[in-house]
Amino acid sequence: MNDLQIDYFMAVATNLSFTKTSEELFVSQPAISRQIAQLEKELGCRLFRRNNQGTELTEEGRLYFDLFSKYKAEFINTKMRAERITGQSKAVMRVGFLEGWDLFNIIPPMMKKYKEAFPDSEVVINCCGVKELATGLLTDTLDVVVTMQNSVKLYSEFECKDAARIGKILIYSADHPLAERDSETLSLRDFSDDLFIAPWEIVDKMIIDAISNYTRPYGFIPKLRFVKNHESTITCVRNNMGVTIADDWVWAKNADDLRWIPFNAQDTIAVARLRTKDNENVLTMEKILMDIIKSLADELRE
């Protein structure tokens, strides 16, 4: 058993997809399958069950998922403590944000405050989808993430703190027939015949239910098409191939070739980390992000 096998196992257990994990880690699917098969042989049990409905953890797999989650977190905590004792290289803080957000008002103050607390530290930023953010925490490639609460709250391994409520908007192309109308006269109902685009990396019951819940009060269930990521979603909308529902913090709302309208729905932004990852650096970054996001949300409401 080695860390590579554990990382592959944790990623597949999070995504419940060998294909998605292969694309996420830039590793061929057969290579991932071989490593997990070797891990299963050493452990003497099956970790996954694959059928027509997809991939799921076996009962034994869930036990090892809990074990490896604790192991990864405790290992990095011990490593950081050992580095402090021996005076080794400066610590690296890895922060993940949901892709597509405009982070201009978050990252600069975050960097300033963290550097004040830990002058010799280094901060690395990664922006990716909700599944990758959860995988990053579980496989110890991310220390703290800022994401949607509903994508992390079900993981018992995570300490998840609600930071702010965020409004939802519908984005459409400047070439859309309705773009000629005053946006203040439009509602979600006016787009009931449009195709709704969403990133396929979060294709599951959660996203389908969420979009349907947004549109149901307006009298329709949308036609959905899933694409690979946020960038693909915005590209489709820009080229008038459909519309999309996004967070109010998305950078694309400011693009000249796009239009948007708010509607009556909100989601919760959360700051998450592994429960066992409670060293001073991580807790400080967690607090800094909570304070900045709450302050920004208050300013937007005023």
Image: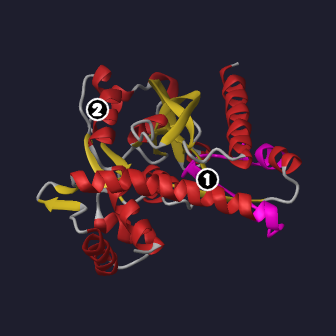
At horizontal 41% and vertical 25% (from top left) the residue drawn is 187
Q: Which span of residues is magenta-colored?
A: 83-112
Q: Is residue 92 visible?
A: no
Closer to us: 275 or 124? 275
Q: Quadrant of the C terminus?
A: top right
Q: Please indicate whether residue 79 sits to the left or right of residue 47 in the image.
A: right
- For disc 2, the neighbor class at 10 Å (few under 14, some 14 to 19, many from 20) is some
- Residue, x 29% and y 67% (percent of image)? 18
Q: Amino acid at mark 2?
A: Ser
Classify 41 as above or below 290.
below
Q: Earlier in the sequence, mark 1 or mark 2?
A: 1
What amino acid does circle 1 point to? Asp
Question: What residue occupies the far left of the structure in this picture?
Answer: 52
Give the quarter of the image for residue 47.
bottom left
Query: Residue 293, image x and y in percent?
Result: 67, 34
Q: Which residue is mark 1?
A: 143
Residue 155 screen position, x and y as percent: 41, 41
In the image, is 25 to the left or to the right of 166? left
